[in-house]
Amino acid sequence: MNKTKLTDWFAFFAPRYILISLIVGILIRIVLIFHPETTIDWGAVEWIKIFGLGLLNDLAFSAIALIPAFVVYSLLCNCKYNKPQGYIILGLLIAATLYFLLTHDITNEYGSALPRVVNVTFVILTIGFAIRLFFPAVREVWRAVVLWLVMVLYFIFLVTTSIAEVVFWSEFGVRFNFIAVDYLVYTHEVIGNIMESYPMGVIGLAILVIALGICFFLLRGKQLSQCNLSSWKKWLITCALLIASVLVGSKWLHYGYRNLDSKNLFATQLQENGEWDFLEAFASNELNYSQFYEMINEKEASELKLQLCNQNSNGINSIKDSLDMIKKNIVLITVESLSGEFLSRYGSTANITPSLDTLIQKSLVFDNLFAAGNRTVRGLEAITLSLPPCSGESLVKRKSADNFFSVGDIFRDNGYRTLFIYGGNSYFDNMGNFFSKCGYEIFDKKSYDEQQIEFANIWGTSDEDTYRETIKIIDKCWENNENFFAHIMTVSNHRPYTFPEGRIEYEGNMMSRPAAVKYSDWAIGDFIAQSSEKEWFKETVFVIIADHCASSAGKISLPVQRYHIPALIYSPGFIEPQYVTKVCSQVDLMPTLLSLLHVSYDSKFYGQDILSPNFKERAFMATYQDLGYYANDTLTILSPVRRVRQYSIEHIGNWEYVEKECEQMNEKLVKEAQAYYQTANTTK
């Protein structure tokens, strides 16, 4: 059968790709609307906005997304093989390939798969260009193969991101954001996590078949031929249209629909384009607070912050205890994704935390303590630095950030060894660099004895391996008469939810969140049991707290219930069991512990002693953009662009909450929120 020659591939491909993108965008919204995580309580206007503005957002992004395709298309002309430019291009490719192969370049920064990908890419580009330069006969076939490949990759990207958006919505209740960007950077962990969690062979094959099927359908009866770039006018017009689409589309995506938010977060998110949200998050991982948030007078903010934190004009709260310090050793365990709702005390009937349920009865327990964020780095930042969350990226991940005042400083000043012990690789999320700057000794998977590791997945060793390593380290400290402050970060309660066999009994899917929670709980119980047989046990205080909840999805951007986490201090014979009902935050945990130990120090912390009669009940909670302040049954949210909202919070029992947007602002609470966050984000 004779095939029609397709002389202008881009003019053929572009409108069809845009049309398919729009259809897929509509289908995704329908799927997400009827997703179990989605709460539908919006009216006709929101429905129009979801599909009307959603269509415009998808149109703008799909036009922008065609830029790479046009660049590739324009580079397929034969002029680049002419002398001398062909030899110049080959020389540059060889130089670049040697640079990446022979030097420790910037792609090695995260220790992930990126260096290998870059090396292989440049080797292929160089060899391929050399073959086409010296053997002209292969250029026509090469051109057809490249255009086919571009089409297939575009549709693989479209199908893959569509599936990923549904999975991401299931976890977080939003379109792509900073979290997706962070995970993409750490390719080794993310790819490994995906491979261990899902049947990627079957899914990948299905995606490839769908992409190839679309391409065959579009190109049926057609044959790709030489690129038609002979008309400079057509080329110039196409470039101008694409540039215009970038300028208009990006402006609309960034500023236009964001001013048309619905009261229901799900409705607002459904209007957006997930791929654009991802690119925007990638480009703006650090938000300039003074540029994006509603500010109050700098002097007023400073004075109010000093008052709220009981600090003098130099930002110091000089804490002088009348009693001598009790030099107990400290083991601080931050447990991955341990929501309060998993524990029996907070309403669970699943019986998946028997060890913690028992420990709670013997501990000082903070019943109304809330996580500062929805990522591990937020929890580590809040507990270690006792600071409210920063806008944009956490301080843990900002390599430029330095001169931290941390809880480790206080313990070192009192003769302690400060240790950070992690089951994974500490380069992840920049944890190793952060804790090193804070003066901690780093013990991670690389320092473990490989022969003694019982189990590991892509995220790191099992919790029991981490606790076993901790006991070895602590034993050495005890033998050397060294006081220790050991901060442990666990990994087992993280997808793919795999752990050693035979540790727990669980009726259901062993590769599930509840099973992983039960294993993490078992590992804590086993660690406490082993520790109780050690000489140092009676001289040690155990602090157990979650880094964040398992999910942060909700009707509003900061659903209070999704930030409620367990926190307890256990030390038989020293800490009396007690349930504390005050509303408090992760930032308050370590100042409270220091008070229990009667430590005198000059505090720069925002956190306060929860047990003090003067403690002001409040909690901080945040995403990467929305900064929340929960006080007096009111949640104040500061958001870009200079947006402030308030919700009245009704506690309906079993640690469940209902949020209702306030018609009138409580300005006192707004100013308190602004004072806390403004000073934390702008003071150097």
Image (spheres, rainbow, N blue to C red):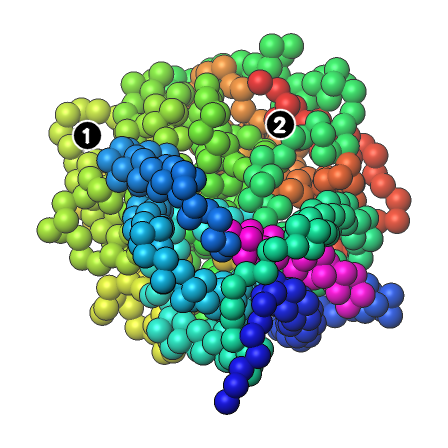
Name the side, left or right, on which 51 lies relative to 566: right
Q: Which residue is mark 2?
A: 681
Q: Position of residue 300 (x, y in %)?
A: 77, 19
Q: Nearer the viewer, residue 613 or 81?
A: 81
Q: Dot 2 lies on which element?
A: helix
Asked whether residue 496 is in view, the answer is no
Q: Which residue is mark 1?
A: 477
Which is nearer the N-term, disc 1 or disc 2?
A: 1
Is 63 in the magenta?
Answer: yes
Q: Position of residue 229 (x, y in %)?
A: 60, 56
Q: How many marks?
A: 2
- Prevalent SS, magenta region: helix
Q: Quadrant of residue 138?
A: bottom left
The residue lying at 17 percent from left, 36 percent from top is 475
Name the side, left or right, on which 316 lies relative to 38: left
The residue lying at 38 percent from left, 71 percent from top is 200
Is 482 in the magenta?
Answer: no
Q: Which residues are magenta?
A: 51-75
Name the side, left or right, on which 367 lies relative to 451: right
Image: 92 above or below 457: above
Q: Amino acid at mark 1?
A: Cys
